[in-house]
């Protein structure tokens, strides 16, 4: 019979300090002021949101800041109903991709503003293609969750 | 191509949780693959390992710790973080330099020891824009699955069929972690953890130390009667932010096209006899079959319904049980090479397909919703 060996439990915690740099700093200053900033590619003209310093496709600088719409269309979503280590939001929650009006990529955020405990109700309420709008937190601190979530518009 | 490169031996360990020590396990698999062809550590030319510190952070900086377990003591060797099929291609290239006649490719992942895969893949996000939302690979896959079903009318039942097929195929695979006879209802009625995905449509986290020994043509003829030849390889990486991408128009088409071009394949559906592909989420097998050119865009559901991809079908896909049955995250791409090699050599035991296999495809993917893809073609 195989011998059962012992295990050791360990956890790694390491502190890092990561620089925002100019583009990320401006984006999050915008969030504190209820502004969503995108940047426009000087070559393909796409508005990228959240803001980027360069266009990953054209590989040229983005040269124009754009205050994007705070409403848009839901393009992808998932109802998260389980826990994983490091999860920043207590389940259930809805992760989503949102195409803000007049932008050219999808913005990753949350859908909320209604009872999420009943999944059948969620499935009736949330549909790709639905209109959504940003709901801001009263206490904003330059974080992606300064927008609490996007709610059905 | 300037010369030929052969796979001369393969070895792997079982995917289920074991309480064996990682360092020992890596040594055992390395030893096994060398012993199969009677090669000594001293004779081994070069080594490329694949692992990922996100998965191994709890034990050490991965390659500094396990270095000597792979026979790399004092060798010209290096390590690839992430997709192990990349490491395979680096090994092929080293042989093609003409400076090495053998190369060991070894991928290491002991899933039983790392946190759940979603905790690891959460660390793939950036801490500014995406980690605060809790994005990880399974959430990205759930986005992709819903889009896939909506855009092409693929049904949940068709997605679940992949899990039914692969978990049943795994019954013939002694290395597989998950296996069994299940119905479509079993799959769909498993816990709805992240809609539209249910728990049984998500791959487990498994153990997998997987080794492939490569050799130059001349050396291969000396080491084995059954060389399996490298024919082609391609990879492609998409942009980082999920929102920048069309989740149903990803990079696998590019990766496959590059591999087919190198291998001289013009009609993959006819010229490829068997495919081992990386489908950590059931529906992805259907989507990847489309992207590999096995069926038309949007027809992945009809493709599985036709039975072609069954173990006894005309183009078996994942006769090993695939990644739904065994998911050593980093090693899963290289494990596809191992499984395809066993099929080409007629050494796949109970999971050996009935048809003759002359050309096989191995596929690996890493990152959210297939951010990166790699495809290798090998043949007898």
Image (cartoon, rainbow, N blue to C red):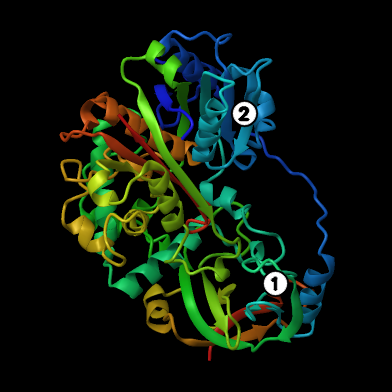
Q: Position of residue B246 (x, y in %)?
A: 48, 69
Q: Residue at x 43, y 28 (%)?
A: B4
Please name which of the two marks, 2 or 1, marks the residue nearer to the observer: 1
Few, some or many C-alpha atoms within 10 Å of disc 2 (few <14, some 14-19, many ≥20)? Answer: few
Q: Position of residue B63 (x, y in %)?
A: 65, 29
Q: Position of residue A118 (x, y in %)?
A: 42, 75
Please tell me whether mark 1 sits on a helix, a strand or a loop.
helix
* Measured Cα–Cα span from mark 2 to mark 1: 36 Å
Do discs 2 and 1 belong to a common subunit?
Answer: yes
Q: Earlier in the sequence, mark 2 or mark 1?
A: 2
Say above or below: B302 vs A23.
above
Nearer-the-camera pick, A5 or B59 = B59
Nearer-the-camera pick, B310 or A39 = A39
Q: Viewed as shown, does residue B310 lie left or right of B223?
A: left
Q: Residue at x 71, y 69 (%)?
A: A60
Q: Which mark is residue A144?
A: 1
- Residue at image mark 2: A8
Please tell me whether mark 2 sits on a helix, a strand or a loop.
loop
Say above or below: B180 vs A115.
above
Give the quadrant of residue A109: bottom right
């Amino acid at each position: 019979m195989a011998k059962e060996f012992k295990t050791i439990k360990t956890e790694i915690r390491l502190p890092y300090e990561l620089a925002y740099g100019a583009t990320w700093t401006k984006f999050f200053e915008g969030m504190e002021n209820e502004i969503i900033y995108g940047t426009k590619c000087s070559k393909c003209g796409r508005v990228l949101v959240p803001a980027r310093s360069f266009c990953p496709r054209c590989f040229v600088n983005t040269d124009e800041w754009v205050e994007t719409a705070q409403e848009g269309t839901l393009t992808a979503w998932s109802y998260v109903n389980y826990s994983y280590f490091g999860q920043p939001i207590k389940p259930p929650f809805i992760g989503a991709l949102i195409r803000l009006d007049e932008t050219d990529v999808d913005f990753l955020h949350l859908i909320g503003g209604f009872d999420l405990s009943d999944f059948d109700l969620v499935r009736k309420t949330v549909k790709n293609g639905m209109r959504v709008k940003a709901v801001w937190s009263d206490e904003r601190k330059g974080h992606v969750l300064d927008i609490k979530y996007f709610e059905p518009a | 191509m300037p010369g030929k490169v052969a796979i001369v031996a393969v070895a792997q360990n079982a995917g289920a949780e074991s309480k064996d020590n990682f360092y020992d396990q890596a040594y055992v698999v390395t030893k096994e693959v060398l012993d199969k062809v009677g090669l000594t550590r001293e004779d081994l030319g070069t080594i490329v390992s694949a692992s990922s510190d996100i998965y191994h952070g709890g034990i050490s900086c991965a390659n500094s710790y396990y270095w000597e377990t792979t026979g790399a003591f004092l060798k010209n060797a290096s390590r690839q973080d992430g997709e192990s099929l990349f490491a395979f291609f680096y090994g092929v290239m080293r042989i093609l330099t003409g400076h090495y006649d053998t190369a060991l490719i070894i991928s290491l992942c002991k899933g039983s020891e790392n946190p759940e895969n979603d905790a690891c893949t959460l660390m793939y996000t950036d801490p500014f824009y995406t980690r605060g939302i809790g994005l990880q690979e399974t959430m990205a896959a759930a986005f992709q699955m819903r889009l896939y079903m909506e855009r092409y009318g693929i049904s949940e039942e068709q997605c679940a069929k992949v899990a039914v097929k692969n978990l049943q195929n795994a019954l013939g695979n002694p290395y597989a972690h998950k296996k069994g006879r299940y119905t479509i209802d079993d799959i769909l009625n498993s816990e709805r953890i992240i809609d539209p995905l249910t728990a049984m449509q998500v791959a487990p986290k498994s153990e997998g130390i997987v080794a492939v020994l490569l050799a130059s043509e001349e050396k291969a003829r000396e080491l084995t009667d059954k060389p399996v030849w490298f024919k082609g390889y391609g990879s492609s990486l998409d942009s980082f932010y999920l929102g920048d991408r069309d989740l149903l128009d990803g990079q696998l088409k590019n990766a496959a096209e590059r591999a087919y071009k190198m291998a001289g394949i013009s009609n993959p559906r006819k010229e490829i006899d068997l495919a081992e592909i990386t489908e950590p989420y059931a529906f992805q097998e259907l989507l990847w079959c489309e992207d590999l050119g096995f069926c038309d865009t949007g027809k992945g559901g009809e493709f599985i319904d036709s039975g072609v991809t069954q173990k006894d079908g005309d183009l078996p896909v994942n006769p090993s049980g695939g990644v739904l049955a065994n998911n050593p995250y980093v090693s899963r791409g290289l494990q596809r090479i191992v499984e395809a090699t066993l099929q080409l050599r007629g050494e796949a035991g109970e999971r050996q397909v009935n048809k003759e296999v002359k050309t096989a495809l191995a596929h690996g993917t890493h990152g959210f919703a297939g951010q990166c893809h790699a495809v290798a073609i090998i043949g007898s």
